[in-house]
Structures are given as structure tokens and as C-alpha cells.
Amino acid sequence: MTAPLPAATLDWLLEPDPANPGVRYFSLRQLLDRPEHDPEVVEAQAAVMRSGPVPAILASQQPEGYWQYPGPGYSTKYRGTVWQLIQLDRLGADPLDARVRAACEYVLAHTQSSSGGFGARGGFRQKHPPPSTTIHCLNGNLLAALVNLGWRTDERVQRAIDWQASSITGDPGFQYYSSGTSAPGFACGVNQGQPCAWGANKAVRALLAVPPGARDERVRRALDAGATFLLSHDPAVADYPYTERVSSAWFHLSLPLSYWSDFLETAENLVGLGYGSDPRLDAAFDLLLRKRDADGRWRMESSINGKTWTDVEQKGQPSKWVTLRALTVISRAGRLKDLD
């Protein structure tokens, strides 16, 4: 018998909250498995577009679909176009909203390099970033957003999926660059040419967004490579290859995430890949449970508030967004009994 979700915590996540309406929407979808056409889900999605961070982000959008500066949209960090699309996805924006669709179209028209991947270049008014600027963290974040926002079958998104999978598996003829994605298996010039676990998490999350029935053999091999790499180190220690030291960002839970990752995202991806009961994740879940407070909630431990168009919750306080993430992965891993 499956252990039940903790009632008090679930009630907290499901309550109407004009400041964070996306929490109720995702709780209905992810924790209660309500279908998209369920009346409560439909109303929760509409609430996301009425109040909270999503309409604040969209209020700063230019009529052409971009934010701040025209062009590829990486600059200014956290206020440029690419960052808004990533946040709109994570915060539950309605894929059918005309402004959201305009943002997706703008990114596809201006941020995709000739390789098919999305490039990290501000380049005010420059039309396309060069392939050498395409890296796993940005491509993964944008690819996940575009798939989740309904653009998976678009030919340009298919090219980005192909880039993501081929860059990991090292298919014959794939072009690598020392300054960007530099070798198969998540190697990145930004990480001194070593495999980047932050980038791996973003890439895996993006490919997991592709429905299983739509994954070709190359995508499946890339996901297998992602699982092998992420499980090659203890996610609770996160001592993946890095030149200086293990980043403290791994252990500070938050949402929205940016180019960095945390150990919870590693757990989310590995659970999505079918490793929820794997003992190699035990330490990560133990760490996650130790962060739970007496009321069954998790705090926002990191934040980019003040750097974005709108703030999301308050650092150091109990967080509905982080609690939703934690409870979702615990439930999907079949570990709800550990909450007792």
C-alpha cells in the first residue's frame, strides 16, 4: 500500500495563493495527477496568468516578444529574454497565451545557432549566436521550456533535441568547441573542459520532457549517459569534476533555478529515469528529509530576488515552491513512508 501524502502540507500547497498561484496548479498536476482538462486545473492555470510572478514577467515584455534588448537574449543576466522563458516554464505559464507564444517564437528565431542548439550570447541586435556558445545548461533549460510550453514538434525544437542528444553521445561528425561544449559526455569549456554536472542536469531534464514514445535511439542513449554520469558521484556530496571546489549551490534549495543546479534536481532527474529506489540515492533523500522543518515544509535557501523582473517568495522562509519540488520527488520515488 502506498503511503499517503502528508495532509497538512498538501493543504498548504493547494490553498489559493495570489502570490504563488503556480504552486496550486503544479500540485494538482504533479501530486494529485489531475488531468490538464480537469476544471480545477483549468482554473488554477488561469490564476497563474492573473496574479503572481508570471503576469509581472509578461508586463516587462516588449511587443515583439523579447525582454530588455533585441537579439539572442542572454543579456542582461536574469532580465534578458532567455531567462524569462525559462522562468515562465518553471512558474506555470499558460502555453496558449499569446505573449508566451511570442516569447517562444522570439527565442526560436534569435537564440538558436546554426548547429541547432541555443547559444549563450547577448549580442544586442545580433541575429544568431555562434555554435561555439552553445552549452548544456542554457540549451537544456530552453529546450525543456519549449517542450513543456508545447513546441516539441516544431522543426527548430527537433533540431535542438538532436543537438542535445548528439552532443552527449558524440555522434560521428558532431562539432565540438573548446570554448563551449567541448567533448561528449557533458564536457564544457566553462568547466575547464571537464564534464559539468550542472549542465548534465539541465540536459537530462530537457530530454526527459520528451515523451517516452517520442524518444529516438539517440535520445535514449543520451539519457542513459546522463544517468551513468549523475550516479558516478554521490548526489548528496556533489563532488562532480570541478577545478576549484564543490559549489555550495548544490546544497541550497530554490526555485526558479538558473544555470546552476542543486542536489534535489539531480534526484528529480534520476527518479524520472527510474532510479527512485536505487540505494545510491539514499543519502540524497536523507539530506532532503533533514532539511524539512517541524511543520513538514522546506525553506527557500537560495534566491535571485532583486536581480529579476519580479521576486519569488523570500529567502530563508518556508517555501511552497521548494516544498512542492521536495514532496513531488519523494512521492515519485515511492519514499513517502520516509516522512513518518
Image: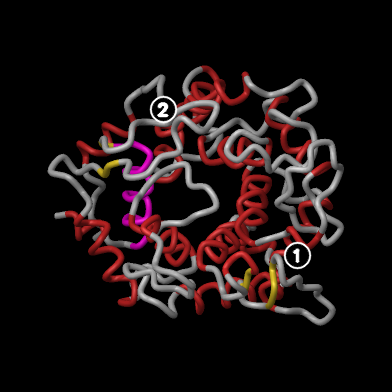
Crowdedness near tag 2: few (<14), some (14–19) or many (≥20) residues, C-alpha within 10 Å: many
Inter-mark Cα distance, 1 to 2 = 34 Å
Q: Position of residue 201 (x, y in %)?
A: 52, 62
Percent x, y for residue 44? 47, 26
Rendering quarter of residue 312: top left
Point out the stretch of residues depicted in magenta: 319-333
Q: Quadrant of residue 266?
A: bottom left
In the rendered image, the vertical position of residue 328 relative to residue 124, given as above or below: below
| Image height of 168 relative to 253, above or below | below
Q: Quadrant of the C terminus?
A: bottom left
> Which residue is depicted at the point 76% across and 52% down?
157
Query: Which residue shows up at 75% across the image and 64% down it?
Result: 163
Residue at the disc numbered 2: 20
Q: On the rendered image, what quadrant is the N terminus found in?
A: bottom left
Q: Secondary structure at mark 2?
A: loop
- Of residues 234 and 194, the one nearer the viewer is 194
The answer to whether mark 1 and mark 2 are in CB contact below 8 A is no
The label number, if any, that marks residue 8 in the structure image: none
> 326 or 186: which is nearer to us?
186
Q: Is residue 320 magenta?
A: yes
Q: Which residue is mark 1?
A: 163
Residue at 26% x, 47% y: name it.
Answer: 5
Regarding residue 291, the answer to whether it shows in the image is yes
x, y percent for residue 46: 54, 22
Q: Position of residue 239 (x, y in %)?
A: 39, 73
Q: Amino acid at mark 1?
A: Trp
What kind of residue is marked 2? Asn
Task: Report the side of 161 relative to 113 (left or right).
Answer: left
